[in-house]
Amino acid sequence: MHSIEPTSWSPDSWKRLLAAQQTVYPDRDVVASAVAKLSSLPPLVTSWEIERLKSLVADAQRGERFVLQGGDCAEAIADCTPDAITSRLKILLQMSMVLVHASKKPVVRVGRFAGQYAKPRSSSTETRTVNGQSVTLPSYYGDLVNRAEFTEESRRPDPYRMVEGYQHAAMTLNFIRSLLEGGFADLHHPEYWDLGFMRHAALPEDLRAEYQRMTDRLADGLRFMEAIGERRVDELSRMEFFTSHEGLNLLYESAQTRRVPRRAGHYNLTTHLPWIGERTRAADGAHIEYFRGIRNPVGIKVGAGIAPEELLRLLDTLNPSNEAGKIILIARMGAKKISGALPGLVEVVQRAGKIVLWMCDPMHGNGVTTAGGIKTRLFEDVLREIETSWDIHHALGSRLGGVHIELTGDDVTECLGGASGVTEQDLTRNYSSACDPRLNYDQSMELAFSIARRMAKGSAAPAE
Ligand code: PEP
Ligand code: CO
């Protein structure tokens, strides 16, 4: 049992330390009342779901599962609609099916949703030219803090947006739970979650045919197992979904951090898997203080600049008992830097005997800005970072256990390239992300097929 509460920790002990990326609200009383409201609401997830995910992550750490984590960069409250929610579920389901088929391993599906409303920013202000005048306003920090629209009114932080965000996360999750309960993700009926795109997408014909074959084979396999009376078929065909978001806004996270009956320790009950961002993982900062006390599995974004000893210190603080299933390291180094940065980190973790799951976020180290000032990413770089990560782990006898992707099931034009050939001219056509550029439906499926091919080659499970 890991029942020991860390010394001198409480859900609010982070307040003694410097917290990066936190909002300065003008009125403390309003903040206190919003936080009190937030704390009084029922939780979004339960401790047994969180422990279940931890056990699945532990399986993945042993190479028995693969983790697919994906969704918007910045989830928008306005996107809490049936269409947007089903479209996100569908793309993750379809990608996971491609991966399951190739790897013959179960895939753990984790959405960047139902609370991915807080964004770290590199600059606290943003300057734009409005009616020929240069205007500077506070940056957009996600719907949990302010609004994306470029007006003074919208950019003013409002503590009650935390309550509003929480309520929308609850509605999102409620709808997801009902869909799953109602058989939306039942593999016997892949037609429920087939996207219209499949028929007219620019996805190359061979990929589309391969995908169709997989879908058919899976459904056939399940029907056959049922016919011969396999009892576990229900468990096999019902899919589980977990939620995740960056645990950035510590007021929001700590307001729903509690003890639960019959279990030791505190749980963050806003999400199954909170992660620590690249900009807020200072070893002596408030975020690490908060995260060291919760029982949830925890993701840590790891950029190319982290020193090996810094990483070890984080692991010692966040997982002193080296509990399996607890730590996911999400490397986000960039296709150019990964070869220089990742091997040393993998080795140091191996030498220290730390149990972690290595995932690859091929998005956040690959940002580029076009001559016209649009933030984008090259699909080619995304693929290359995953490939390189795969090679590095394989060469070191380690394992790439999952991917973390910013994506959408919609036909957006935010990242360049891929089989459907999004060009720089296309970027303005349907660029709807309020923050970082996401892969669109075609690019996401193409990515899944590319990972699947690599898995099928068998290098997913190097010698132990
Ligand atoms: C993100 O995941 O949207 C993000 C901001 O990532 P990172 O902390 O890795 O920059
Ligand atoms: Co992002």
Image: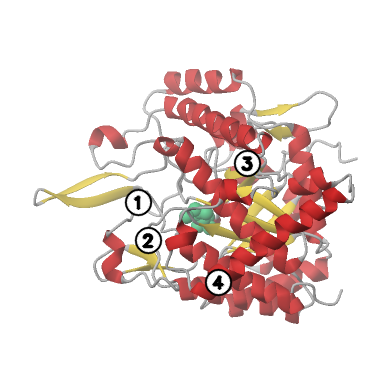
Labels 4 and 2: the sequence-earlier one: 4
Disc 2: which residue: 414
Residue 233, position as x, y percentages in the image: 82, 47
How far apart marks 1 and 4 lie (CA) works out to 27 Å
Numbered disc in front, either 4 or 2 = 4
Residue furthest out toward the front: 227
Res 412 → quadrant = bottom left
How far apart marks 3 and 1 lie (CA) works out to 27 Å
Disc 3: which residue: 184
Quadrant, the C terminus: bottom right
Q: Nearer the viewer, residue 184 or 276?
A: 184
Coloring scheme of the render? Answer: secondary structure
Q: Nearer the viewer, residue 37 or 292?
A: 37
Looking at the image, is 341 positioned above or below residue 130? below
Circle on res. 207: 4
Rate crowding at label 4 as few (under 14), some (14 to 19) or many (20 or more) other CA atoms within 10 Å: few
Disc 1: which residue: 432
Labels 1 and 2: the sequence-earlier one: 2
